[in-house]
Image (spheres, helix red, strand yellow):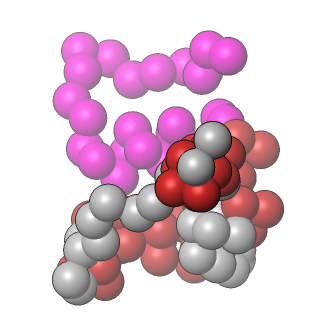
């Protein structure tokens, strides 16, 4: 195996290389949602590279809260609201 192949394998194990980054992430809806959740739940979210303190980790640890917030924050319209989150 060549060193280029080794490097490629290492990147795959680490989650790969970043393909794209928004030039102004603070102007995105995702950033605004993250800030809203941070303020509402008194949570400090670090960068996504810190998996334990990320929005992703919160969404896994607090599944019902996460999906409830997504429902209301995005303004999903339905004939009736949800009663619980199916896990």
Question: In the image, what residue occupies the spot 47% across and 68% down?
Answer: 34
Please identify the quarter of the rendering in which residue 66 is found: top right
Q: Position of residue 26 (x, y in %)?
A: 31, 83
Q: Is residue 76 left or right of residue 55?
A: left
| Residue furthest out toward the front | 2
- Decide whether residue 75 is among the magenta residues: yes
Work out whether residue 12 or residue 63 is closer to the camera in this orientation and state it: 12
Question: In the image, what residue occupies the spot 71% across and 60% down?
Answer: 51
Q: Position of residue 35 (x, y in %)?
A: 47, 76
In which quadrant of the rendered image does the N terminus lie?
top right
Question: In the image, what residue occupies the spot 39% across and 38% down?
Answer: 71
Q: Position of residue 37 (x, y in %)?
A: 54, 66
Work out whether residue 38 or residue 84 is closer to the camera in this orientation and state it: 38
Q: Which residues are magenta?
A: 63-87
Relative to 25, residue 74 above or below? above
Q: Is residue 5 left or right of residue 27?
A: right
In which quadrant of the rendered image does the C terminus lie?
top right
- Decide whether residue 43 is among the magenta residues: no
Work out whether residue 52 or residue 20 is closer to the camera in this orientation and state it: 20
Question: In the image, what residue occupies the spot 58% across and 66% down?
Answer: 48
Relative to 50, residue 1 above or below? above
Q: Is residue 56 visible?
A: no
């Amino acid at each position: 195996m060549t060193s280029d192949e080794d490097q490629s394998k290492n990147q795959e194990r680490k989650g790969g290389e970043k393909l794209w980054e928004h030039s102004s992430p603070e102007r995105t809806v995702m950033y605004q949602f993250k800030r809203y959740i941070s303020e509402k739940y008194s949570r400090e979210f670090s960068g996504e590279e810190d998996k334990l303190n990320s929005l992703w980790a919160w969404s896994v640890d607090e599944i019902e809260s996460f999906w409830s917030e997504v429902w209301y924050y995005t303004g999903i319209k339905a004939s009736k609201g949800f009663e619980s989150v199916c896990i």
